[in-house]
Image (tube, rainbow, N blue to C red):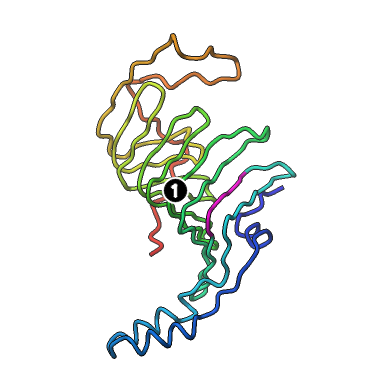
Amino acid sequence: MKTQKFASKILQLIKLTRIAVPVLGTAILFFACQKNDIDKIKAFSSPENLPILEATNFETISTDSGTVRFSLKAPKLLRFENDGKTFHEFPEGLLLIKYDENHKITSSIEADYAKEFIKEEKWEAKNNVIVTNEKGDSLKTEHLIWDEKNETIFTEEYVKIISADKIITGTGLTSDQNMQNWKIKNPKGVIYVEVDNKNRPEQTDSNIQPAKAETNDPVISTTPPKQAVNFN
């Protein structure tokens, strides 16, 4: 069974609040503003620039054959429909978690701001973006695109990848959505971190060994994503 898309789940689960144009407040602004500002006020109060739906303290899940595969939490969600384009905006950030069939976390994305483009099946995350994989490795950047359809993530911005024994920095990155196979386009440097084995927990069969420093880092994805799409 195909995984249910967040777009449909959002419409099914959120409690919707219609947004009305604040007529009285807008009228006061009109009288208070100079003549050359009237067009700007009209543009701001136009229905095309207002969200048609709003939700606060939003939470939802996406399932596949009854198994939870994604969960999403956000303080605020806004839905816009402009010129035939529909998107969801998360102005106060979000936390998106991906699970495997055993409900084990395989990756997560956290950001201070995000958008979901419904038709394109792409997500854009900005400001303090953190991606974490099941090994505990973290990617930090200021801008990231998640191609939900092709299951890839990419960015053209500065990136920092933090693992158990090293920190890698550079500009631009492509990866699968689970951050298992990734490539930094322009690597800048590697800082190796000394690991304190005495204080580390014992490894079990279910644990994955921390990444080792290899001469051929970074790993090249077997399915490199497409170039970033400019949604602006």
Looking at the rendered structure, the secondary structure element under dot 1 is strand
Q: Is residue 71 magenta?
A: yes
Q: Residue furthest right?
A: 66
Q: Residue at x 58, y 41 (%)?
A: 98
Where residue 229 appears, as percent x and y from the top left, is 40, 57
Q: Main secondary structure of the magenta part?
A: strand
Start-end of magenta stretch: 70-76
* 168 to the left or right of 125: left
Quadrant in the rendering for residue 172: top left
The image shows residue 130 at horizontal and vertical percentages of: 43, 41
Q: Is residue 70 above or below residue 212?
A: below
Q: Looking at the image, is 15 positioned above or below residue 32?
A: above
Q: Nearer the viewer, residue 208 or 35?
A: 35
Circle count: 1
Residue at point 72%, 47% (across, down) = 1
Identify the residue at the far top of this view: 198
Question: Residue 77 lies in magenta, yes or no?
Answer: no
Which residue is at 38% across, 65% downward?
A: 232
Q: Quadrant of residue 193?
A: top left
Q: Residues within 10 Å of mark 1 (few under 14, many from 20)?
A: many
In this rendering, position of residue 31 left or right of residue 200: left
Relative image position of residue 43 (x, y in whole percent): 39, 81
The residue tagged 1 is 111
* Residue 60 x %, y %: 63, 51
Amino acid under label 1? Ala
Q: Nearer the viewer, residue 138 or 74?
A: 74
